[in-house]
């Protein structure tokens, strides 16, 4: 198993990174000094976020000179996702000790609505310099431009910044430049960044927030993507689906009337399978779940076949569950997220399950289950009622499913 050295500038940042590692089975310690370093992975808390530049440099120097970097397979500089702290000087000092071929800076944390677009950090859609983080009485941020932070850290060195459009290009690769920084609007962007950097096979200093660390660990531990199955047509679910799409989850839209008319699931199964095999999280959903106007269209189209509303509901669950079953027969996933009680029961029925064991509650009203017997025995399933939860609940559930690192 790889050994990681993560250097963070405060205790809470150290702990959230440590939890990510622990969830994947890594023995990890958070330490304040290196007098007697843990033999495996460590998160070193420097407590320098609110220090002056000079104090931060002195503190970091005293720690770095005692570290044996040869013990570690990966070195990560954890930074605050709002760009507080002494990022430039700490990046430069760490690079001077570690001697990386590439310094990769990607500070976005999409799960907390902190994204980088055109080199500018935005918090909930607002430039970070126009938020309260720029007015922090102890350590306000001085810039929200990630390129500027890299230039301050490595003055005079060539710098390459990659835009979102470049990152999402099918030919995306990292050029032969030592200092690189990245836009990122969602978790899939971060995964693509990690993949491209890995392709270089060079010694990399990873600099970023919990978002980059998570993407790196997902790659290193070959964590399978998660699958969602959604039949609810509530407005709450619709907002959650739009938030999931913005976070890079691939939505496979299934017009129930079209699947019934064509008598084939192939296009939807193929679309989901292709995305999952590429490492992308996927949601199978009825078209009416995403677009309210599709509900009336579905009812009108299927009424031509003399189907009652109850029969249409049963048909919807059968189509969604049938497609899900075919996808799961082709691709391994970390687990399944299901929204809507009827949809969940439809999946268990088609998989010939005897029931489901309750494991725990991930959040209020969001249980984690384990399928008992049948075709998907042992699979972890997260369920929620259709009209329930905040806008980011699907993103939260997918992250939890993958953090368990159980491939079924």
Image (cartoon, grey):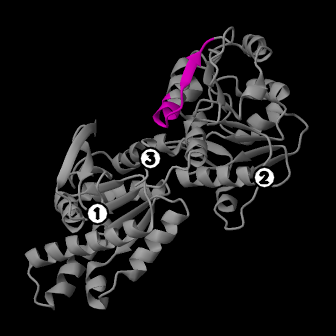
Kindly identify the residue that appears in the image at 25 percent across and 58 percent down: 235
Residue on which the image places disc 1? 375
Kindly identify the residue that appears in the image at 56 percent across and 45 percent down: 221
Viewed as shown, does residue 340 lie left or right of 311? right
Relative to the observer, which residue lies in front, 347 or 60?
Answer: 347
Secondary structure type for disc 3: helix
Give the magenta range. Answer: 19-32
Which part of the image, by quadrant, shows the N terminus?
Answer: top right
Q: In the picture, residue 314 is in which quadrant? A: bottom left
Relative to the observer, which residue lies in front, 57 or 259?
Answer: 259
The reply to whether residue 157 is in sight is yes
Q: Residue furthest front?
A: 373
Secondary structure type for disc 1: loop
Looking at the rendered structure, the number of numbered marks drawn on it comes to: 3
Q: In the picture, residue 408 is in which quadrant? A: bottom left
Residue 127 circle label: none
Figure check: 81 above or below 342: above
**Mark 2 Cα shell of 10 Å, populated few (<14), some (14-19), many (≥20):** some
Q: Nearer the viewer, mark 1 or mark 3?
A: 1
Q: From the top left corner, tell me how far across and down residue 128 is, in percent.
A: 58, 36
Q: Residue furthest right?
A: 156
Kindly identify the residue that appears in the image at 84 percent across and 41 percent down: 101
Of pointers 1 and 2, the one earlier in the residue sequence: 2
Viewed as shown, does residue 286 lie left or right of 358? right
Disc 1 and disc 2 in contact, CB within 8 angstroms: no
Secondary structure type for disc 2: loop
| 100 inside magenta stretch | no
Figure check: 173 above or below 64: below
Residue on which the image places disc 2? 200
Of pointers 2 and 3, the one earlier in the residue sequence: 2
Residue on which the image places disc 3? 402
Q: CA distance from mark 1 to mark 2?
A: 41 Å
């Amino acid at each position: 198993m790889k050994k990681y050295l993560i250097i963070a500038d405060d205790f809470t940042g150290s702990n959230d990174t440590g939890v990510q590692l622990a969830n994947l089975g890594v023995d990890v310690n958070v330490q304040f000094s290196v007098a007697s370093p843990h033999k495996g992975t460590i998160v070193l808390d420097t407590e320098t976020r609110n220090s002056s530049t000079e104090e931060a440099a002195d503190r970091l120097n005293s720690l770095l000179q005692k570290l044996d970097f040869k013990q570690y397979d990966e070195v990560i500089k954890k930074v605050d996702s709002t760009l507080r702290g002494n990022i430039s000087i700490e990046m430069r000092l760490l690079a001077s000790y570690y001697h990386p071929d590439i310094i990769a800076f990607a500070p976005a944390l999409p799960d907390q609505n902190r994204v980088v677009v055109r080199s500018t950090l935005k918090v909930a859609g607002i430039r970070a310099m126009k938020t309260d983080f720029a007015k922090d009485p102890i350590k306000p941020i001085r810039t929200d431009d990630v390129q500027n932070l890299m230039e301050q850290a490595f003055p005079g060195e060539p710098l390459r910044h990659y835009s979102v459009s470049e990152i999402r290009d099918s030919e995306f690769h990292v050029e032969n430049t030592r200092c690189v920084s990245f836009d990122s609007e969602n978790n899939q962007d971060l995964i693509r960044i990690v993949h491209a950097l890995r392709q270089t096979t060079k010694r990399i200093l990873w600099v970023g927030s919990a978002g980059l660390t998570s993407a790196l660990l997902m790659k290193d531990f070959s964590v399978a993507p998660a699958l969602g199955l959604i039949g609810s047509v509530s407005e709450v679910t619709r907002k959650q689906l739009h938030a999931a799409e913005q976070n890079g989850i691939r939505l496979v839209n299934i017009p129930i009337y079209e699947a019934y008319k064509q008598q084939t699931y192939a296009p939807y199964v193929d679309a989901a399978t292709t995305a999952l095999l590429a490492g992308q999280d996927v949601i199978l959903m009825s078209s009416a779940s995403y677009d309210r106007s599709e509900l009336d269209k579905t009812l009108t189209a299927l009424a031509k076949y003399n189907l009652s509303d109850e029969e249409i509901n049963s048909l919807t669950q059968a189509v969604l569950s049938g497609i899900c079953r075919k996808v799961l027969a082709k691709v391994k996933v970390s687990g399944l997220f299901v929204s809507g009680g009827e949809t969940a029961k439809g999946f268990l029925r088609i998989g010939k399950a005897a029931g489901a064991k309750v494991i725990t509650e991930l959040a209020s009203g969001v249980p984690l289950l384990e399928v008992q017997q049948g075709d998907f025995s042992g699979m972890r399933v997260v369920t929620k009622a259709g009209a329930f939860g905040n806008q980011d609940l699907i993103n939260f559930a997918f992250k939890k499913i993958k953090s368990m690192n159980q491939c079924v």
